[in-house]
Image (spheres, helix red, strand yellow):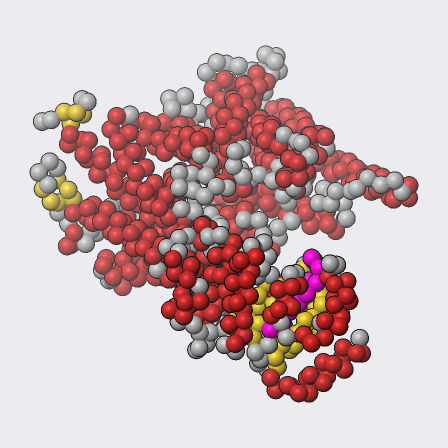
Amino acid sequence: MTHTNEKSQTMADATEADILLDVAGLNGWYGESHVLHDVALNVHKGEVVTLLGRNGAGKTTTLKAIMGLLKPRKGSIRFNGTQLIDLPARTIARMGMGYVPDDRGIFGSLSVLENLLLPPKVADGGFELSEIYELFPNIEERLTSYGNRLSGGEQQMLSIARILRTGARLILMDEPTEGLAPVIIHQIGHTVRRLKQAGFTILLVEQNFRFAREMADRHYIVQEGRIIDEFHKDEVAANLEKIQCYLGI
Amino acid sequence: MTKHAETSNPAQAQGQSSERHRTSRHHWVAFGLIASFVIIAPQFLYPIFVMKLLCFALFAMAFNLMLGFGGLLSFGHAAFFGGAAYAAGHAAKVWGWPPELALIFAVAVAIVLGAVFGFLAIKSRGIYFAMITLAFAQMAYFYALQSPFTGGEDGLQSIPRNALFGLVDMSDDGVFYWMVATIFFGGIIFIYRVIHSPFGEVLKGIRENEKRMISLGYQVQRYKFITFIISAAVSGLAGGTKALVFHLASLVDVHWTMSGEVVLMTLIGGMGTIFGPIVGAAVIVAMQNYLADLGSLVLIVQGLVFIVCVLAFREGIVGVLAKLLKTRL
Amino acid sequence: MMELLGISVQALLGQVLLGLINGSFYAVLSLGLAVIFGLLNIINFAHGALYMMGAFVAWMLLTYVGMPFWVALVVSPLIVGGIGMIIERTMLRPLHDLDHLYSLLLTFGLTLVIVGLFQNFYGVSGKPYPIPAALTGAVNLGFMFLPIYRGFIIAMAVIICFATWFLIERTRLGSYLRAATENPEMVSAFGINVPLLVTLTYGFGVALAAFAGVLAAPIYSVNPVMGNDIIIVVFAVIVIGGMGSILGAILGGFSLGLVEGLTKVFYPEASTTTIFIIMALVLLLKPSGIFGREV
């Protein structure tokens, strides 16, 4: 454990000013059940950081806690220096955090266009509709279809697209590749890389390690609601067996 | 309400068994208190007042079988209460039947109404169920308003209490009181037995987790339907008795405000408790009696009681008592 | 004089008109209930009492402040809608996470309080409210005389129903409402204040009821119990139309009013129960209502 702390310390010294999201001592509960135990992680501006772990490890729960959708929670969540721990989700969203949930959250009774336009703009610099159509041409084709008529891949694209319009700079993405065909996964990977180039910061939850490996700058391993290890992308090859063991693959 | 799991640990089993004994003791005490009250009350309260109380207590207990144990809020129980009142009145006045037969007829009418309404309403759940029962009861109300059998706005008046079994004169309130008391006791013991029977256990299971009961193979709709009919029948018994007590069956008995009142009685006494409805009925009937001169104020007070109970006092009087004594009442 | 099935065309059209007028009230009231139920998932039992309040506030504004009908048509819904928002914020929001039956019970209690209060101060007899001068008289349509105010009621009901439908189905605000009905958590995660949306929606539904009340004031006597029996019919209408369905409420309201009116021509005794019988039939065939979402 000390090994990891030293590593984080070195990296932290180098880019202290660039930390966009800083989580420390985060504890969370589903009702009476204590599900998150002293979770600590950070994300630097422009990074893609993943939360890896087995099913039920607490990855989605961690994202929800950061987004303000898990109550009760205690600890510290700093976003751009501001403490989020007592704030409701709607305020957190307005501060520039976007959420792409694992069930995609597409409103079936609304049209694709309505879905796309629904999230209000929270900052300048969001994508224009024309840019979104360029990135996701199949959305433009399906504007009048209802949300529940879209395929899984189309829903996933829409779910990401509508966040891009808002100007949110930190995107929480929960298992974007789950249940999708390899072709679509490839498209999503391409999208995530484009976003990274554009300077977006992404905290990504993934079970698909191959996908995560290609995208991420750093990986955290989550187990039973705790962060148990951390790897920089350069360390992955050397620790492959260990990581695979963590993930049970 | 926690379901006690069966255990093979003898010490635990001992503990559970003694808890059941404790609860049983409390219930014996409760019945004892009720019996004492019923016996002593006519000495210092008007028999008519106590009889009214007993009728509504029975009505509320019948209603609670649906709500507290079945988890189904019916807003149309006035149809059974009032419908049976008219039936009993008609049998006694127009056909000259003795009270026991008039009441049997009243219960029969309530059962038929219960079967018809229940069959259609059971298809829905929750709020839909409440609204549908309300609408059906309103149909019954309009029928009562227009039908030649019911006397319309005037109601069915001067209902006689013919001789019991053709032999015992019932016209004296003091004498009739004992018949009502017997009916009341019979009724609440019957409901108590239903609640504590295997049937009752299934019902509680349905209330707590309907999907689970379905997956366990129980015919949930059938259980709900039977409960509806039992509830309607006993409500009818209460309504028919009430008609004989007051010599009157009127539109008030079938109006939705009557349905609302029985909900209030159950709520204030404690939904899902066994004895709560009796206490709730006592409170509401007494309150109506003392506030009778204040006209619309009764409505306001009842409404406020509803609101306060829902916001802050959902367990009801008996519910709070049961929590204090750590038992089931 | 023409006759149709033994009834004069005059009488038939008279009943059709009456049916449309009743239908107008059913439609506007059902619409309010449907909007509230759609988002909040509660049956606002107090809807009838708030309709009555809308009428009474209009009467009070006229009597105490001399406010004319046209202004009251806007002010009364605003006042009653505001009261509705206070009710939602203070009494309904705490019950939000509980079984929805508690909300039904609470609004039932509210009904008793509201009706009781008005009854206490104003008795049961009706208060007169004059038809506004510009709308008095009748228009000769050739086959019948149409009282202008009654035509106005129908027109206003159609306009307000269409406007509400448009607001909910075709605007951005409406999309927030529809989205929040489907997945309120997601809508919060986008930055929208969902609790505020809920409060405003309840207020809007209540304002619709009050609006119907103001429309009703000149032709029905303004009395504390005027909402008591209409609320049950409106419940049946939304069960038939489908509980959360805007379209079901509007179409159901108008058509059921019409059906009720026609029944009165041919079989007067059954007219009050027609709607309930239709409800029973719909329950047998499609329990979620004609336009309802499957339960």
Q: Which residues are magenta?
A: A48-63
Please give left or right for residue A244 compared with residue C40 in the image: right
Q: Quadrant of the C terminus of chain B?
A: top right
Please give left or right for residue C37 compared with residue C126 in the image: right
Identify whether A78 is placed above or below C157: below
Identify whether A17 is placed above or below C31: below
Near-viewer residue (B78 or C123): B78
Identify whether A188 is placed above or below C13: below
Question: Would you say residue B41 is visible in this rendering?
Answer: no
Residue furthest out toward the right: B10
Identify whether A46 is placed above or below C286: below
Image coords of residue B294 (percent x, y)? 47, 48
Question: Would you say residue A218 is visible in this rendering?
Answer: yes
Residue C109 part of the magenta-drawn span: no
Please give left or right for residue A63 compared with residue C136 in the image: right
Image coords of residue B257 (percent x, y)? 47, 40
- What is the quadrant of residue C234 in the picture? top left
Q: Residue at x 48, y 57 (%)?
A: A154
Image coords of residue A31 (percent x, y)? 68, 59
Residue A58 part of the magenta-drawn span: yes
Please give left or right for residue B180 compared with residue C86 in the image: right
Near-viewer residue (C156 or A103): A103
Q: Residue at x 23, y 57 (%)?
A: C69
Q: Residue at x 57, y 19 (%)?
A: B104
Image coords of residue C134 (percent x, y)? 14, 54
Q: Quadrant of the N terminus of chain B?
A: top right
